[in-house]
Image (cartoon, rainbow, N blue to C red):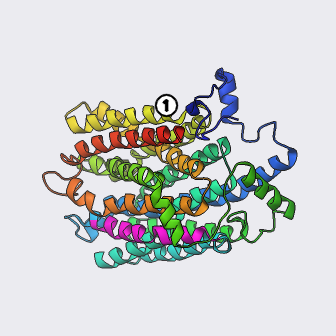
Amino acid sequence: MAALEVHEAEKGQPKKRLGVFGLIKEIFNWYPGEYPKEEKKLLFKLDVSILVFACLCFFVKYLDQTNISNAYVSGLKEEFDLYGNQLNYLNICYFTAYVVFQIPGMLLISRPKLARWLLPTLEILWGVVTFAQSRATNINQLYAMRFLVGMLEAPVFAATHFILGSWYSGPELFKRAGTWFICNPLGSMVSGYLQAAAYKNLSGVGGMPGWRWLFIIDGIFTIPVALIGFIIFPGVPDSPRPFFLSEGDIALARERLARYKIRRPGPLNLDVFKRSLKRWHIWIFVFCYICMIISNYPSQYMNLWLKAEGYSVVQVNQLPTVVNAVTIVASWLGSSLAAIWPSWTLYTFASLCCLFSTLCMIIWTIPTGLKFFAWYLFGVSGCLSPILYSTVNTIVKDDSEERALIMGAMMTFGYSFNIWVPLLAFPTAGYDGAPRWRRGYPMTFVFYFFLWAGFITAIVLYRRR
């Protein structure tokens, strides 16, 4: 089996070359022929339960996270008279809560008795707050509600990676992480189409503008997904057994953990922090994620450029969805290929694409067609996050609590930069404001390079252990 264990090729061991047909077959080979029948059956059950809920949960999370930007360019700005940096402040409220509750949420998800119920419960609560945003009467109410949404959504991303790493290993993990991650851009993509449809078809219905209907629609999506989670989400192998897994399934899952040397949850105490801080893992991976968050920020706001260029409300909401479509393909295909090829090659290719797009934005005065191409090429960055988190799951598989702490710290420190960096480098208004960002794009270029360098460093350190 090829995999990032980190990769046999990355450890200096030869791997057989695959032809085009063999490569395509391997990408779609989720249940290898050498696996016993019982193990294939277990993997299928896990895919149906974990991936179905995780994908739906991640999809609605990004619907609820990105809808504020779609609402802003679809009437919210004008209705609340927002002509300063209020969009930045809304994001700061969200990310402040997102940062503060990362590590507590991750440590909770590492507890087997809580792991099965935590995410569905949080989703119920943020669905209620999403509904409430449709009734906001001033910007201060939206600030408060964005804080609550950020608090409740905080552990979802890293917790799902943790859950995947608690059941899967090697190529299994990379392929499933990439498939799950496509629901991030898919949520953002659908949010754009939903806002365009709400603006065209629901404006004035019930006496409400279209941007308010977007929050109602998103809430309608969110609550049923949470209820599904209570039924099918299995938590970790040591969580209370769900109805669809037999005692034999759980025994096999635990045997797989031993086979792949994935450590089961142990005591949660001060020693977790001490041993984590003594190893290089947390320092390198947190650095990588900080670089990823800073560099990725401007690629989410193609709609601000389109609005400044005078495109229609429908176009402003729909044209950026091509970025999401590219991200969907890149996250799935890149992660699947990372289960076959050395992951550093995929990381290098994606980083070069992002550096090229950022260079185009630094120059700025380029043909419109090239600028559209540069915006859309940013979508290739979609494979960077699932490859990075799958790498963490694989390298730190021998310590469940350290793995949870690292993922929580990555999100905490990474998104802490989203609280203040946008105000300095990516202001909404002013000479250096959106969409030009004279200070922001050079900074983006530097941090894309640092992200690549940090990832390569992690691979090198792992090979030398």
Report the number of discs: 1
Question: For the point 71% across and 53% down, which residue is it?
Answer: 47
Q: Would residue 24 appear left or right of 100 to someone viewing this image?
A: right
Quadrant (top left, top right, bottom left, bottom right) of the N terminus? top right
Query: 150 and 199: which one is in front?
Result: 150
Where is residue 457? Give x, y as percent: 43, 40
Q: In the displayed structure, would residue 13 be above or below residue 37?
A: above
Residue 102 within the segment the image draws in magenta: yes
Query: 373 and 350: which one is in front?
Result: 350
Q: Amino acid at mark 1?
A: Thr
Question: For the point 72% across and 63% down, which residue is it?
Answer: 237
Viewer can see residue 322? no
Query: 462 and 89: which one is in front?
Result: 462
Where is residue 374? Give x, y as percent: 34, 35
Viewer can see residue 100? yes
Label 1 packing within 10 angstroms: few (<14), some (14-19), many (20+): few
Where is residue 186? Give x, y as percent: 52, 50
Question: Which stretch appears magenta?
Answer: 89-111
Determine which quarter of the picture holds residue 236: bottom right
Where is residue 107? Give x, y as percent: 54, 69
Question: For the point 35% across and 63% down, which residue is it?
Answer: 416
Q: Which residue is mark 1?
A: 345
Residue 356 within the segment the image draws in magenta: no
Q: In the displayed structure, would residue 163 be above or below residue 361?
A: below
Q: In the displayed structure, would residue 136 be above or below residue 350?
A: below
Q: Would residue 64 appear left or right of 1 to someone viewing this image?
A: left
Q: Would residue 286 appear left or right of 220 to someone viewing this image?
A: left
- Assign the magenta stretch its main secondary structure: helix
Mark 1: secondary structure:
helix
